[in-house]
Amino acid sequence: MKYIIKKQVTYREANGGKDNIINLAPKINFPIGHLIEYYLLSKRPIDLLEYVTKIRIPGPRKYVKEIGVIFSEIKLP
């Protein structure tokens, strides 16, 4: 949950950002994509870039670095 919440805060652009699209935080009751990323970050980080590329996230290498930082900043109990 900490990973999902931190990621939502990081990527939220309430003012529209550079693309002028308001990116509100997704509903926390639909965390499947976040859970897949979390699993890959914690258990199979080598496969993360391939997954992100396959689901067509723009700038996959940059995105993998960004979520890697988010993952490293959370403190697990």
Image: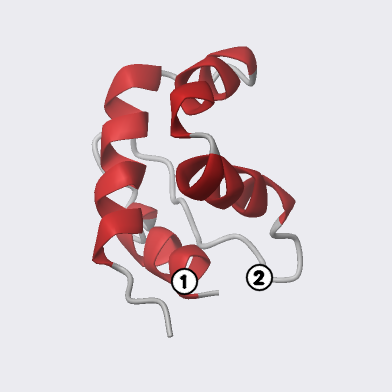
Of residues 11 and 45, the one nearer the viewer is 45
Residue 44 visible in the shown view = yes
* Residue found 36% across the figure and 52% down from its top: 11
| Element type at mark 2 | loop
On the image, the x and y values in percent for residue 46 come to: 45, 24
Location of the N terminus (image quadrant): bottom right
- Vertical order, 66 against 15 (above or below): above
Q: Is residue 23 left or right of residue 33?
A: left
As drawn, the label of residue 5 is: 1
Kind of residue indicated by mark 1: Ile
* Residue found 28% across the figure and 41% down from its top: 66
Residue 59 visible in the shown view = no
The tag earlier along the polypeptide, 1 or 2, is 1
Question: Residue under circle 2?
Answer: 28
Of residues 56 and 2, the one nearer the viewer is 2
| Element type at mark 1 | helix
- Vertical order, 37 against 56 (above or below): below
Image-quadrant location for residue 76: bottom left
**What is the count of numbered marks?**
2
Image-quadrant location for residue 7: bottom left
* Residue found 24% across the figure and 35% down from its top: 18
